[in-house]
Image: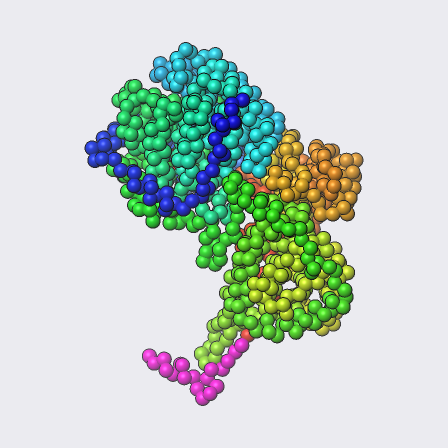
Amino acid sequence: MPNDHSAPPPFSAPYAPDDRAIADGLLRTARLDSAAERRVDHVATRLIEAIRANDDPLGGVEDMLREFALSTKEGLALMVLAEALLRVPDARTADEFIEDKLGQGDFVHHETRSSAFLVNASAWALGMSARVIQPGETPQGTIGRLTKRLGAPAVRAATRQAMRLMGSHFVLGETIEAALARAQSQASQHRRYSFDMLGEGARTAADATRYFFSYASAIAAIGRTAGKTPLPDRPGISVKLSALHPRFEAVSHARVMTELVPRLIELAQQARAHNLNFTVDAEEADRLELSLDVIAAAFRDSSLAGWDGFGLAIQAYQKRAGAVIGYVDDLVRRLNRRMMIRLVKGAYWDTEIKRAQERGLDGYPVFTRKAMTDLNYVACARQLLALRPRLFPQFATHNALTVATLLELAGGEGGFEFQRLHGMGEALYAKLAEDRPGIACRTYAPVGSHRDLLAYMVRRLLENGANSAFVALAADEAVPVAELLRRPADIVGGADHAAHANIPLPRNLFRPQRINSRGLEFGERAALDQLISAIAAEPTFASENAADATPAQASAAISAAREGFRKWSRTSAATRAAALDRAADLLEQRTAHFIALLQREGGKTLDDALSEIREAVDFCRYYAAGGREQFGDGEAMPGPTGESNLLRLRGRGVFVAISPWNFPLAIFTGQVAAALMAGNTVVAKPAEQTPMIAAEAVRLLHEAGVPASALHLVQGDGRIGAALVAYPDIAGVVFTGSSEVARSINRTLAAKDGPIVPLIAETGGINAMIVDATALPEQVADDVVTSAFRSAGQRCSALRLLFLQDDVADRMIEMIAGAARELRIGEPADPSTHIGPVIDTEARQRLDAHIARMKIDAKAHYAGIAPPGNYVAPHIFELSDAGQLTEEIFGPVLHVVRYRANRLGDVLRSIERSGYGLTLGIHSRIDDMVEDVIDRLAVGNIYVNRNMIGAVVGVQPFGGQGLSGTGPKAGGPHYLARFATEQTVTVNTAAAGGNAALLAGGE
Ligand SMILES: Cc1cc2nc3c(=O)[nH]c(=O)nc-3n(C[C@H](O)[C@H](O)[C@H](O)COP(=O)(O)OP(=O)(O)OC[C@H]3O[C@@H](n4cnc5c(N)ncnc54)[C@H](O)[C@@H]3O)c2cc1C
């Protein structure tokens, strides 16, 4: 091992800083002198002209994208088809899928516009109907007729063939041997290669091992044919860390370091033995710090000393790119070694933007304007060029202006290389080789079977088809060359325009209505560490308000709430809303305090606790905003002249709010906030398992300005709840919990004389997910594991019953079980824990009993092992019939049922038969199928191609139907009104003598 002094301090840089500050620096250094700018124009123009003149007889992807642009229905349908068709094993689903996608576009008229081979090949499959089509026919009709004429197998085979062809455009070979042979046949052009073994990231230990061996055997094969030239003129391999570990995530840091670093060292040693270029690809921003820790630890290994082939990719769209270069340079200096650095712009921009929005971050880790990425790319390139020869820059781009600028900056031909992706940038680099034969270019060459290439191919299609992408613009003759020569600095304009005007900051996503709740990126070590220390510093709690109430206290609370109603209901909506907004702010300020409480009393993991606080914050702000709108001055109704008609909402009286332990803060706060906003006073009874959280929430609401007379807390178990509900003069009940208790509340209310009061009940469900053969197994595994096992399955939305199409069931079950095996169960305060305890011993015993029963009645696919305590490990059982599951099992137990592709109707019937209708998941690429299921099933929340938990306030209003609840949905636009009464006030404005307003109107 190297000496410790060779270890640099861990990488640290602001995760998502303000764009403006960065732009200032970038704009200051962006300009070259005018002679240099002219040279850049000249070179770039030559390259662009070469791209445009390219008439490769084999066609390029550019041709195809011009033909089926992603902004068209056809382009999108083609992309979805490309993403999934080749993995569908059964003919029936493949046919349905093809029909669904081809039905979405008008491929027919594309057939003859281009002579390029690729276009023709795709069009032949997708639009071969042109040869048989009659004027006036619809594409759907054509497919039907085609199928009749040629037979479904022929249409299917042709379409699959076209997809393969598209794939082979981007992939050098299906195996490393085939790829090497193809590379060697092109060796006359003196190309350097970096091979990449395709595949999705590992979800299971078996995946990670398979990828490891696939890299290892590729290195051996590449080494055998590598020849004798020295580095950098050697072939290479690119590896993805996410392929080598099933939990490559920041919270699993310790485990990743122990398990992944030795694997990476082993692969690097093998690469070293052949003196190859060994590059670690760059992945998502939240994994950057973890990646650098892994890379530094591997790179420092003394067995790699003296070898210059180790490298990594750095993404210039990330705001931290410059800091990463500084970090790597420091590392290399300390060890007196060299590294190869591939500078890319970055391939996951859309994912980064979405993740930052979902997580409620203060900013984006990536730029939001493409010109900023381009500017930063050049700035990073300068930094790298200045660090030669310690760092060997590898500029990966297909942008002619970027290439021309780098040539100008490099000031010579040595000490760096360009890189391109196989299937892209061919004409550009052919021209460059002609003009500047001394400049080296390496091709990144993906290797893999058809099934493995799909996700990669879609990335490339997106990259080529994006409106902002250079390759798309360069291919479009309608875009003048001068437009392509516009400098990023001119496009940005000034620092004030550095951020995209139409991409709001995550915090402003819901503006002007409200601000988004603040979240945190666990991939930012500084933020995570700070939060963890703040949580650890929270004292152990003992709340004086957590003791059970006596019946007399409960009665007193009801009377006091009745007293309080007069004043609170007359408090203006603006004042009530302001108190809720203040409560939201206070919750955000006390995040650490509430996380500590949620962990200690509710057994919540860090991720769950943070999400729950965010949900509570969102409830407060959402109902405040809705309340201002709905409970303000009232809504004027139309009517005849001479009178005014105003519809107003007002509070009903005393609301009893009964909430469960599984969201002891969010549901508790949501119910209370809505009832208060509507002008009611509230007697809240939280679950007996989580009294302290409720007590703290009430204290906070009081502090925020809700008068003590308006909100009363009554602790206790179900008996106290039943007593509260039975009081004669309560005005409504809001309840979340089991169907059984909801029914009993309903009966109590119905038995009372006096006004009939509303019951808003949110109850459970036997939630299903349907997965067909077009779904992506890795995505299904992620979403199933999250939906079924997160929060130890203690969410009412959690997945209980998974229907898998039998053609793909074995593979899916294997992957889901393998992914479940990688979850860590344990102490919730440990950030690496994925599954905490269940709520109490009673819950554990009930679950253990169910598991024991299932072990006899069903086939166990996975039975996890739980540590001692109230832990229940994930279990996966296969049932022969969905009817075997008759009740909601509130824990990490997943039940799987297989279905045949032609028996989807049976699946839907069995979901209907349960009588519940809370959440439903669908994983399919067949839109028709998805729409049919949505139409058919009365389910409150349906999630397509994603997980089915974690509804966001105001985004996915939440609540079920049938046995699952009464509605209206929590966090939805109709919720508040249910807590209110309506009042219409009609005033005869002409009563005092005549209709003055009408008469004054004139002509
Ligand atoms: C050899 C090679 C290896 C690669 N390895 C990796 C890797 O390890 N990791 C990785 O992530 N990518 C990798 N890539 C992919 C690479 O990121 C893209 O191919 C590259 O971004 C395209 O850049 P360009 O200069 O060719 O295109 P251009 O069209 O000039 O630029 C496209 C870039 O702009 C970004 N962009 C688009 N819109 C915006 C916006 N509104 N705001 C900010 N940025 C925007 C895109 O995300 C993309 O990064 C690699 C590419 C090559 C050629």
Q: x%, y% of residue 944?
A: 56, 43
Asked whether residue 986 is drawn in magenta, I would say: yes
**Residue 832 in view (yes/no):** yes
Tell me where residue 50 sits by quadrant: top left
* Residue displayed at 48% across by 26% down: 6
**Left or right, residue 984 beside residue 33:** right
Give x and y (percent) for residue 995.
Answer: 43, 84
- Left or right: 184 in relation to 944: left
- Residue 245 part of the magenta-drawn span: no
Is 982 above or below relative to 109?
Answer: below
Which residue is farthest top? Answer: 228
Quadrant position of ligand 1: top left
- Residue drawn at x 56%, y 46% as measured from the top left: 531
Closer to the camera, 329 or 56?
A: 329
Q: Nearer the viewer, residue 452 or 400?
A: 400
Look at the image and tell me whether residue 314 can be seen. Answer: no
Magenta segment: 985-1003
Could you tell me residue 74's position as x and y percent? 43, 38
